[in-house]
Amino acid sequence: MKPNSTFLNLPKKFWACVRLISQEVGYTERKTGQIKIPTLFEMSTQLEPFGIDFELLQVQQTKGKVAFGTLFQDYFAYRANIRPLAKVMIVP
């Protein structure tokens, strides 16, 4: 699978927040197993206990002048919509 060029070379701060948001919001819906696409409100409320001001974070920009808030939404939507890898059966 080729990486999506939109998400290449993003700052470590972005990926740290993606990981923290995923851990706190949850990666999948428990009942359906669907990969979650957290809302901006969910992201904000999950980062708040860690002292992260989401309002300031989401307006920070990459070198390409794209706001983190937009990238968060785009990344989580992309992650939820990429085709899952085929399951491989291992025969003993």
Image: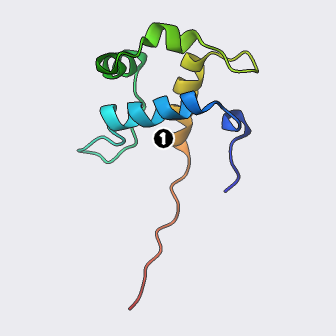
> How was this image coloured?
rainbow
Residue 33 in the image: above or below residue 22 = below
The extreme front residue here reads 51
Residue 43 in the image: above or below residue 54 = below
Query: Residue 13: which quarter of the image?
Result: top right
- The kind of secondary structure element at disc 1 is helix
The extreme right residue here reads 64
Residue 89's x, y, as percent?
43, 79
| Callout 1 crowding tier (Cα within 10 Å): few <14, some 14–19, many ≥20 | some
Residue at 50% of width from left, 55% of height from top? Answer: 84
Residue at 56% of width from left, 37% of height from top? Answer: 78
Residue 52's x, y, as percent?
40, 16
The residue pinned by badge 1 equals 80
Residue 87 placement, left or right of 60: left
Query: Residue 32: which quarter of the image?
Result: top left
Which amino acid type corresponds to the residue marked 1 in the rendered image? Ala
Looking at the rendered image, the quarter that the N terminus falls into is bottom right
Residue 39 placement, left or right of 77: left
Residue at 31% of width from left, 17% of height from top? Answer: 45
Looking at the rendered image, the quarter that the C terminus falls into is bottom left
Residue 80 in the image: above or below residue 47 = below
Residue at 46% of width from left, 68% of height from top? Answer: 87
Query: Residue 34: which quarter of the image?
Result: top left
